[in-house]
């Protein structure tokens, strides 16, 4: 099994796997061919922030994928190139599951993030895949939190757009 970084020439394989991983409702909204076109355009716009990995048996079509989203972080003194990474859209064809392909894909994505200097790698997993990530060293964290948008709205936030910010104070003299 070859697991490696995908390139633009692999967009049809990636689109096929993403489409198969979609829900029936999602698949009903767009056919696979037009999704391939849309994915190619999206990836061209996000090539600097999203890296894809494919798993392929020798001389065969791809059977699995993983995506790595790279997120630059706000600089700190002495650390101006901070980076976080998030593993996304890991999918292995059902008939290929249980053979370590998902593990190999997650390792490839994690290794790539580490080579780039990511301070942390996160993943939002399905319940079924949690043991896979735990075997690879992922663990829950009390410091990494999330909230669904509807809960924020329920707390009084307005979903109509970004919040209004107060005007910036004038710069200090001689600046």
Image (tube, rainbow, N blue to C red):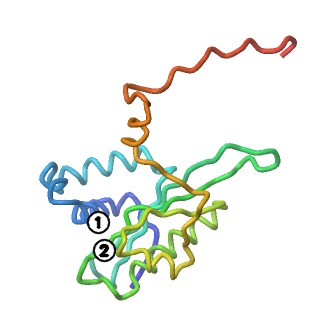
Say the numbered circle drawn on residue 13. 1
Q: Position of residue 130 (x, y in %)?
A: 43, 74
Quarter occupied by residue 75: top right
Query: Helix, strand or loop at disc 1?
Result: helix
Q: Quadrant of the C terminus?
A: top right
Tell me the SS state at disc 2: loop
The residue shown at (25%, 54%) is: 36
- The alpha-carbon separation of the residues under discs 1 and 2 comes to 6 Å
Front residue (pair 2, 27): 27
x, y (%) of residue 2?
41, 81
Is 8 left or right of 27, judged from the image as shown? right
Mark 1 and mark 2 residues within 8 Å of each other at the beta carbon: yes
Disc on res. 143: none
Residue at image x 25%, y 49%? 37
Q: Between 53 and 27, which is closer to the camera in this rendering? A: 27
Q: Position of residue 108 (x, y in %)?
A: 51, 73
Q: Earlier in the sequence, mark 1 or mark 2?
A: 1
Q: Is residue 113 above or below residue 163?
A: below
In the image: residue 166, left or right of residue 91: right
Identify the residue under disc 2.
Answer: 62
Percent across and percent down for residue 23 are 20, 60
Q: Residue at x 44, y 75 (%)?
A: 105
Front residue of 91 and 51: 91
């Amino acid at each position: 099994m070859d697991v490696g970084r995908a390139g633009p020439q692999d967009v049809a394989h990636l689109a096929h796997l993403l489409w198969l991983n979609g829900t029936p409702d999602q698949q009903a909204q767009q056919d696979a061919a037009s999704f391939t076109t849309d994915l190619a355009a999206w990836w061209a716009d996000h090539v600097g922030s999203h890296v894809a990995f494919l798993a392929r048996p020798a001389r065969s079509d791809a059977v699995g994928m993983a995506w790595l989203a790279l997120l630059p972080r706000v600089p700190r003194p002495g650390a101006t190139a901070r980076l976080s990474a998030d593993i996304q859209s890991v999918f292995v064809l059902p008939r290929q599951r249980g053979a370590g392909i998902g593990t190999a894909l997650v390792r490839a994505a994690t290794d790539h993030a580490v080579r780039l200097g990511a301070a942390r790698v996160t993943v939002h997993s399905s319940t079924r895949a949690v043991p896979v990530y735990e075997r690879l060293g992922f663990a829950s964290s009390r410091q990494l939190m999330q909230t669904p948008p509807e809960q924020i709205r329920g707390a009084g936030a307005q979903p109509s757009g970004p919040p209004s910010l107060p005007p910036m104070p004038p710069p200090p003299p001689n600046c």
